[in-house]
Image (cartoon, grey):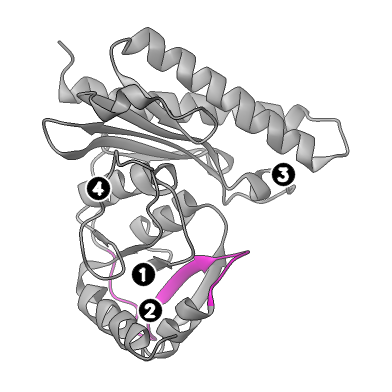
Amino acid sequence: MRSAHDDHLTAHDLATRAGVLLTELRDSWSGDDPRKLRDAGDRESHEFLMAQLAKICPDDAALSEEGADDPKRRDADRVWIVDPLDGTREFGEPGRDDWAVHVALWTKQAGGLTAGAVALPARELTLSTAVPAPSDQPARAQGPLIAVSRTRPPDFVAAVVSKVPGAQAVPMGSAGAKVAAVLLGEVDAYLHAGGQYEWDSAAPVAVAQAYGVHASRIDGSPLIYNQFPPNLPDLLVCRKELATVLLDAIAAVRGEGA
């Protein structure tokens, strides 16, 4: 029987190894069409992760952005939720490091996420539930930095940022990279309201929860995984002391109909 320790290490190891695969693919790519590189990255990372999970945890179900949704996960006790390449656009742009690999585990026994890892391959860094959380970062004196979508920042998010004194929006790529920036103290929050799926946030949220960071829907309700269909459209990850301020600002904007 697998232990929780094994699951944490599996998530960390697989995300890291998939990241190495992607880095080597990107560094050796000689084509001039970034779409082909992105497609190859999605495919090769997905195939690697699915093959490894089938070998290591053959009785577990899996949900991957790049794979067909297996109805067996509805009744499964353990489901791996994977984004083989989060931030595909950024992966295809030379020099960008805001792309990631997500590997998370949901278990029926816990009723939620129990392990997870976010690899940032271009930074040679993996944040996971297997690694102790860093010490708390001091509060930012000039106002919070809020990570937002680089390519699809909805007007709603801009309206929320405008209601928080001193806040500034910081556009970034991958959802995993944005949550990692919160955990590393590079920004103070990540707010998203433009539509996502479970694989976009499962691993980042698993790690955020292990680090003691606030993570919820934008109405403050819990993030629930292994649902059908796997839609999870909005997300707030932030320093705990900012949660009430940001949730109040979100509620105000929603009340105004923005």
| Inter-mark Cα distance, 3 to 4 | 30 Å
Mark 2 in CB contact with mark 3 (< 8 angstroms):
no
Above or below for 163 versus 44: below
Q: Label 2 to label 3, Cα distance in Å?
A: 30 Å
- Earlier sequence position, callout 2 versus callout 3: 3
Q: What amino acid is found at the position of numbered circle 4 in the picture?
A: Ala
Label 3–label 1 contact, CB within 8 A = no
Q: Earlier in the sequence, mark 3 or mark 4?
A: 3
Examine the image and state in which quarter residue 123 appears.
top right
Check whether the beta carbons of the residues at disc 1 and disc 4 lie within 8 A of each other: no
Decide if residue 224 is in sight here: yes
Neighbourhood count class around disc 4 (C-alpha, 10 Å): few under 14, some 14–19, many 20 upward: some
Between the residue at mark 1 and the residue at mark 4, the CA separation in whole angstroms equals 16 Å
Observer-side mark, 3 or 1, equals 3
Crowd class of label 2 (few under 14; some 14 to 19; many from 20; radius 10 Å): many
Helix, strand or loop at mark 4: loop
Q: What is the quadrant of the N terminus in the image?
A: top left
Residue that badge 4 annotates: 133
Labelled disc at residue 144:
2
Q: Residue extending furthest left? A: 109
- Judged by its main secondary structure, the magenta piece is loop
| Disc on the earlier residue, 4 or 2 | 4
Tell me, yes or no, whether the two marked residues, 2 and 1, touch with CB atoms within 8 Å.
yes
User: According to the image, label 3 marks what residue?
Assistant: 92
Start-end of magenta stretch: 137-154
**Callout in the foreground (4, 2):** 2
Please provide percent x and percent y for residue 35. Answer: 77, 40
- Tell me if 49 is positioned left or right of 31 in this view: left
Amino acid carrying mark 2 in the image = Pro
